[in-house]
């Protein structure tokens, strides 16, 4: 010690400063300290809270109840060094969260109470949270004990973020900054009434704006992205356009991030990417419904306020290996009971079984029921819609409110739009180009498949099945031997009235598609966003499922209509191919 003191004194005197000597001696006396942190993320929980699956019935080996067991087990060791984050899309999905949003909304939202129970430290907003409307999500965000982030959700009045842009957490002297963002494509999916007064900034530009601020003002040891957006889809390819899915792109293009948690595309993934400065960034996605949990372990070594090193490792853990947290289930049993009463309410009787698996191979009773509802509500002569479920079966017999969440999964509004006959045809051309394979022989597939697709949205298809639009009210064929853009032939309206490509017709279409979702009206029909908006004649003020429930309550007995108004041709090829593909997708 005497030798070090002498060296420090001589160094300080050589620099002409006793203060420099004192600083040197102080730095010699500070020991290195290593802190172990664990960051965990849920995303796209979609109402999967309990051990019970409200959509399909029975036990679900997923959800917040099992995640609670993981958190408690690991907090026994880590304490508050385990930091739990939620990445949005928690307010939509299963019927019980719909009940909490709209039917029993006077008290504190049970989802806010659940996140507090789980010790959530920070969250981001998801597009399906925004889908609930200002009244629901503004109240929910205000009730959360943790900050809800959204750096690129801009308040038009102030020009500033509508939600807190980032949060800083301190654990034993280690500072963790979390920047939250959302997919900016919301105006393509949702009616403006749901996000009135807001704008959604490009994620790349937003990150470039905030990372220097965070680095300068907060001087964090770790920077985390919490992005409700998919990995790297180039859905919008126009120069300067905001990308729907840009999480991994941001990690690569915007230096500063150590970890990027993302979601939205329901894909289980953990991978490292290299950013523009040559540094590694760990990117993780826990898929959906609490089936997986993103887990990042970080060893941070500091000497005083100086960062010496950080070691980052990640994994996506399967929650089926964890038991249900009995205390979680007990704590929220009253909320669950009220929701069960809601979904169990009998609304009518169904005379024939509905099976969504039928919709991919031709006209089906499942889709005909939705088409009929859309035309009855709007009075439009044409209906366009897509399947929202891959394999929902509604048995004949008693119908309950809960069944309607399998018939129609999302809270879409219903629009009436004016489209020309050509726009209708071109929209369908793009739909079937994404849906059906080009057959060159009877041995080819009918459907455009990707049998290796592992995420929860493709499910064996090359493209998203919720963009497979069919039409009712018109008779048409789909020739799968023809090239892209030349497959659809519309013969007439179903009542025999001639169909004119040059005339304008009213069309019943859901708000997701009517806002440009899936690009079928933009890239398919060739309409700009402004042109789409001008063609919206009217909109319902409630979601389509509300009207479906009301229709069944009024009619009491429902016999699904049969609308055999379209078919794949040549049938001698397509029918055997359909049987093969049905087996490929759904087994026997």
Image (cartoon, rainbow, N blue to C red):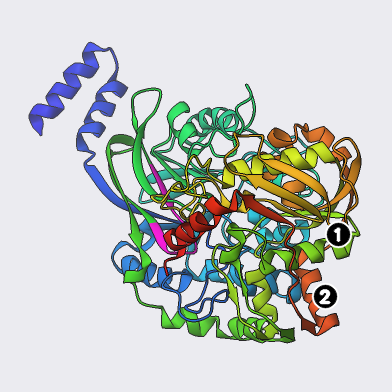
Q: Is residue 421 magenta?
A: no
Crowding around mark 1 (Cα neighbors within 10 Å: few <14, some 14 to 19, many 20+) is: some
Can you say whether 236 is above or below 560 in the image? above
Image point (75%, 34%), residue name: 159
Residue 202, horizontal then vertical, whole percent? 62, 33
Image point (70%, 59%), residue name: 137
Crowding around mark 2 (Cα neighbors within 10 Å: few <14, some 14 to 19, many 20+) is: some
Residue 77, horizontal then vertical, whole percent? 28, 65
Q: Farthest front residue?
A: 572
Question: Which sits earlier in the primary sequence, circle 2 or circle 1?
Answer: 1
Residue 153 visible, this orientation: no
Give the camera-side residue of 276 and 507. 507
CA–CA distance between discs 2 and 1?
15 Å
User: Residue 540, labelled with which disc?
Assistant: 1
Placement of the N terminus among the 4 image quadrants: top left
Q: Identify the residue position indicated by label 2 in the image.
A: 551
Q: Which residues are magenta?
A: 283-293
Residue 295, horizontal then vertical, whole percent? 35, 54
Q: Secondary structure at mark 1?
A: loop
Can you say whether 194 is above or below 238 in the image? below
Residue 362, horizontal then vertical, whole percent? 63, 58
């Amino acid at each position: 010690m005497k030798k070090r003191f002498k060296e420090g004194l001589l160094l300080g005197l050589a620099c002409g400063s006793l203060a420099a000597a004192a600083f040197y001696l102080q730095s010699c006396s500070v020991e290195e300290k290593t802190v172990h942190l664990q960051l965990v993320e849920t995303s796209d929980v979609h109402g999967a809270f309990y051990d019970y699956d409200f959509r399909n019935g029975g036990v679900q080996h997923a959800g917040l109840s099992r995640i609670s067991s993981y958190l408690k087990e690991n907090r026994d060791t880590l304490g508050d060094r385990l930091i739990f984050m939620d990445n949005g899309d928690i307010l939509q999905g299963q019927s019980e969260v719909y009940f909490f949003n709209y039917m029993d909304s006077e008290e504190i939202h049970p989802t806010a109470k659940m996140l507090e129970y789980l010790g959530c430290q920070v969250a981001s907003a998801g597009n399906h949270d925004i889908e609930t409307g200002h009244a629901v999500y503004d109240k929910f965000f205000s009730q959360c004990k943790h900050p809800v982030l959204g750096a690129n959700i801009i308040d038009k009045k102030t020009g500033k973020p509508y939600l807190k842009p980032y949060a800083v957490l301190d654990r034993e002297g280690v500072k963790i900054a979390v920047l939250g963002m959302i997919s900016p494509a919301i105006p393509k999916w949702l009616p403006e009434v749901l996000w009135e007064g807001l704008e959604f900034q490009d994620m790349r530009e937003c990150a470039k704006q905030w990372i220097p601020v965070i680095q300068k003002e907060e001087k964090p040891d770790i920077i985390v992205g919490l992005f409700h957006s998919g990995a790297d889809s180039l859905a919008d390819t126009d120069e300067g356009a905001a990308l729907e899915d840009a999480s991994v792109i941001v990690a690569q293009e915007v230096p500063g991030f150590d970890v990027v948690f993302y979601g939205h595309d329901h894909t289980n993934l953990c991978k490292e990417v290299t950013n523009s400065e040559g540094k590694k960034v760990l990117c993780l996605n826990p898929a959906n419904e609490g089936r997986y949990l993103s887990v990042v372990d970080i060893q941070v070594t500091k000497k005083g306020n100086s960062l010496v090193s950080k070691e980052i490792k990640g994994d996506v853990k399967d929650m089926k290996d964890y038991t249900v947290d009995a205390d979680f289930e007990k704590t929220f049993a009253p909320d669950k009971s009220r929701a069960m009463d809601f979904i169990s309410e009998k609304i009518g009787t169904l005379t024939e079984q509905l099976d969504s698996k039928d919709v991919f191979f031709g006209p089906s009773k499942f889709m005909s029921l939705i088409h009929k509802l859309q035309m009855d509500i709007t009075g439009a002569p044409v209906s366009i819609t897509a399947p929202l479920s891959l394999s929902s079966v509604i048995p004949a017999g008693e119908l309950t409110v809960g069944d309607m969440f399998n018939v129609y999964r999302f809270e879409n509004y219903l629009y009436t739009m004016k489209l020309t006959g050509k726009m209708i045809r071109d929209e369908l051309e793009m739909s079937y180009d994404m849906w059906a394979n080009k057959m060159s022989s009877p041995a080819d597939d009918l459907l455009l498949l990707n049998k290796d697709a592992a995420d929860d949205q493709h499910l064996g298809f090359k493209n998203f099945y919720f963009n497979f639009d069919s039409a009712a009210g018109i008779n048409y064929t789909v020739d799968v031997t023809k090239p892209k853009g030349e497959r659809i032939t519309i013969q007439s309206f179903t009542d025999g009235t001639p169909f004119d490509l040059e005339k304008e017709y009213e069309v019943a279409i859901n708000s997701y598609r009517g806002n440009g979702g899936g690009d079928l009206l933009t890239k398919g029909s060739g309409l700009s966003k402004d042109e789409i908006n001008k063609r919206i004649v009217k909109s319902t003020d409630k979601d389509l499922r509300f009207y479906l429930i009301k229709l069944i309550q009024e009619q009491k007995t429902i016999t699904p209509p049969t609308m055999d108004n379209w078919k794949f041709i040549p049938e001698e090829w397509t029918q055997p191919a359909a049987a093969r593909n049905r087996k490929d997708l759904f087994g026997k």
